[in-house]
């Protein structure tokens, strides 16, 4: 596929890349973006608001491009010692996100004057971003990142998604059946030790790290296995409900007061039979609002493996209003 767009100083090298290469896909997206920007600059929101809105709405899928760069491309560049994009370009992404957020608000309010006033700034910002990608980001990335590393991108890119109407072909070409990241246990060179770690769906942690996460998590978690026995609870600093080691190995029917045990047993029964997957409750308890949820746990074959109970004090969360986007420590 030949690509002809404004971000073209690196284009001769891009056109030599094999089908599906991450950089080639970025340029295919770039062609789509350039087309949308051209349409957006020509449409008159005052005359044909719906046409304007459709174009703008499609352009907002550029968020997928931002996320792929931030979570896929930038970490590889950091590994090779280039941290600039993770700082400067990420900040530029956030500026564009803010502009898009404001325009979305103007759209909701049908404030046409503000829309017409803001769109040129967004167009100019995205064009400058594409130009920087073309002249600096992608040429340097091609120099730093190895062929083998580029071949690791597709799985993560697919999880985030693309702007394109059709999913890009896998790179490298997939001969065997594609393995989803959650089922991929291929060992790769990582910038940290794997000693004493376990592989989880999305990474590696030591038992100590797992325990610390559970300890500092602002939730009460209790796991009842498929035999209706309590096998785990997390020990946080402030618990919603009291727990002690005595409940480990105890049948769940004996871990609740008599007035609620029938309800708990019904939840377990429905989960086991597969008729329900979750249940939730919220109520006042000692002048605090509590939110309690139950989730059916199932394995890959959808076999019932127990219940996860999650309890949270949401009193202060319910009081939140407006936005807080800045740190207020000072």
Image (tube, rainbow, N blue to C red):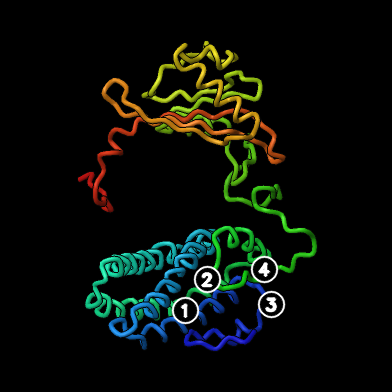
- Name the secondary structure under disc 1: helix
Residue 164, image x, y percentages: 56, 73
- Name the secondary structure under disc 4: helix
Circle 4 residue: 147
Residue 148, image x, y percentages: 68, 64
Q: Are marks 4 and 2 in contact (CB under 8 Å)?
A: no
Disc nearest the viewer among 3 and 1: 1
Q: Is residue 248 above or below residue 321?
A: above
- Lower position in the chain sequence, tag 1 or tag 2: 1
State the image quarter where residue 240 is shown.
Answer: top left
Disc 4/disc 2 C-alpha distance (Å) = 24 Å
Which residue is most to the right?
176
Disc nearest the viewer among 3 and 4: 3
Circle 3 residue: 18
Mark carried by residue 235: none
Q: Residue at x 75, y 65 (%)?
A: 174
Disc 3/disc 4 C-alpha distance (Å) = 11 Å
- Say few, some or many: other residues with alpha carbon within 10 Å of mark 4 (under 14 / 14 to 19 / 20 or more): few
151 or 301: which is nearer to us?
A: 301
Disc 3/disc 1 C-alpha distance (Å) = 21 Å
Disc nearest the viewer among 4 and 2: 2
316 or 55: which is nearer to us?
A: 55
- Say few, some or many: other residues with alpha carbon within 10 Å of mark 3 (under 14 / 14 to 19 / 20 or more): some
Q: Residue at x 71, y 68 (%)?
A: 172
Circle 2 residue: 163
Q: Is residue 289 above or below residue 69?
A: above
- Name the secondary structure under disc 3: loop
């Amino acid at each position: 596929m030949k690509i002809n767009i404004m971000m073209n100083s690196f284009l001769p090298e891009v056109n030599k890349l094999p089908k599906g290469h991450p950089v080639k896909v970025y340029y295919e997206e770039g062609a789509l973006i350039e087309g949308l920007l051209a349409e957006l600059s020509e449409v008159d929101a005052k005359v044909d608001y719906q046409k304007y809105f459709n174009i703008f709405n499609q352009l907002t899928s550029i968020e997928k491009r931002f996320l792929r760069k931030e979570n896929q491309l930038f970490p590889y560049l950091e590994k090779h010692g280039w941290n600039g994009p993770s700082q400067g370009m990420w900040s530029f992404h956030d500026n564009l996100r803010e502009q898009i957020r404001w325009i979305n608000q103007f759209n909701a309010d049908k404030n046409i004057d503000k829309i017409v006033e803001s769109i040129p700034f967004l167009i100019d910002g995205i064009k400058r971003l594409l130009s920087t990608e073309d002249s600096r980001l992608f040429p340097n990335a091609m120099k730093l990142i190895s062929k083998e590393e580029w071949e690791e991108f597709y799985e993560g890119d697919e999880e985030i998604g693309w702007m394109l109407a059709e999913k890009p072909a896998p790179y490298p070409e997939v001969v065997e059946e594609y393995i989803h990241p959650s089922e991929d246990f291929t060992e790769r060179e990582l910038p940290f030790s794997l000693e004493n770690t376990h592989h989880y769906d999305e990474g590696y942690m030591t038992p100590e790290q797992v325990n610390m996460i559970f300890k500092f998590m602002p939730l009460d978690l209790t796991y009842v296995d498929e035999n209706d026995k309590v096998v785990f609870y997390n020990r946080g600093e402030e618990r919603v409900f009291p727990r002690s080691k005595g409940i480990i190995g105890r049948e769940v029917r004996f871990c609740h007061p008599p007035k609620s045990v029938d309800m708990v047993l019904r939840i377990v029964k429905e989960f086991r039979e597969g008729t329900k997957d979750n249940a939730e409750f919220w109520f006042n308890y000692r002048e605090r609002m509590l939110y309690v949820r139950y989730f059916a746990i199932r394995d890959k074959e959808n076999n019932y493996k127990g219940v996860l109970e999650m309890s949270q004090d949401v009193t202060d969360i319910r009081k939140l209003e407006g936005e807080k986007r800045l740190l207020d420590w000072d």
